[in-house]
Amino acid sequence: MPSKSHTLLAEKRTVVGKKVKQLRDKDLLPGNIYGKSIKSQAVQVALKDFQTVYHEVGETGLVELSISGEKKSHHVLIHHPQQHPVTSQFLHVDLHEVDLTEKMRVQVPVELVGESLAAEKAIGVLLQLTDEVEVEALPTDLPEKIEVDISNLKEVDDMIKVSDIKAKAGYTITEDPETVIVRINPLEKEEAPAPAPAAEAVEGAEVPAEGEVKPTEGGEKKPESTEQKPQEEK
């Protein structure tokens, strides 16, 4: 089904550079809007409102952006929101204005559905190798996600490729058909047990120090070998 439009209100932003931290302290998210028919400009949105919209549409859902002081709204997609690596707090966002009559290519998330018999019975390990695929569609027809049913994965080496996915009406999958989405890998083999430690020396037995020659039964020392050891290759 086509993505429904969500609304977001923005204001023109005059604070730039390192001073944008002041905006974040006020729960405002700095960003930029850009596109073919619009000159890039700095904007800011309420962080709470952005989080709500982003949670619902991700980077493939259409957003109707209104900028204070402007009569015309903008149809945008959220692009690569920057987040703090530790706190995951949103730091900046790009808003890409799109033409509703022009097809575009975007990466759409892959969601696995169903249960794999091979994984359930511990026959193998389920491994997802691709979590996004490229699709082409009008902005209003972009899917928010693509579901992949894994219930037919029953044996080791069973897999699902892009070519196995049936696209729904409104969009075309343009990813390489041979790209593997998910596969059943063999179970990891258990490591061989470590060899038992060597028996400890008999208590009280005399152990020669490194480099020392132990006397023979007759009290004489064995002559040192004159044979030279081969030198290690450098």
Image: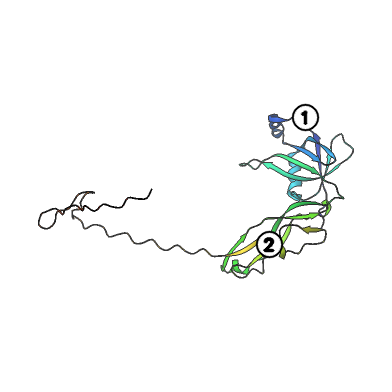
Vertically, is 26 above or below 48? above
Where is residue 17? Give x, y as percent: 70, 30
Q: Residue 178 carries which label?
A: 2
Question: Which residue has dot 1 on it?
Answer: 14
Could you say which quadrant of the image residue 38 lies in? top right
Residue 112 % position (x, y) = 68, 61
Determine the residue positioned at 71% across, 43% down: 81
Q: What is the three-letter code of the residue carrying label 2?
A: Glu
Question: Residue at left 64%, top 62%?
Answer: 182
Q: Can residue 136 be seen in this view?
A: yes
Placement of 16 over or under 160, stated as above or below: above
Residue 167 x/y as whole percent:
77, 62
Q: Which of 112 and 215 is in front in this view?
A: 215
Q: What element carries label 1?
A: loop
> Residue 117: which numbered mark, if any?
none
In three-dimensional space, the C-alpha distance between marks 1 and 2, rounded to whole angstroms, equals 48 Å
Image quadrant in which you'd find residue 110: bottom right
Q: Is mark 2 on a helix, strand or loop?
A: loop
Viewed as shown, does residue 67 lie left or right of 118? right
User: Which residue shows up at 72% across the image and 61% down it?
Assistant: 147
Q: Residues within 10 Å of mark 1 (few under 14, many from 20)?
A: few
Q: How many labels does the image show?
A: 2
Q: Could you tell which of marks 1 and 2 lies nearer the N-terminus?
A: 1
> Which residue occupies the extreme right position in the image?
71
Screen quadrant of the N terminus: bottom right
Q: Where is residue 46 in the image (x, y as percent from the top left)?
A: 76, 38
Work out which residue is located at the far left of the displayed protein and give it. 218
Position of residue 205 in the picture relative to residue 126 (left or right) = left
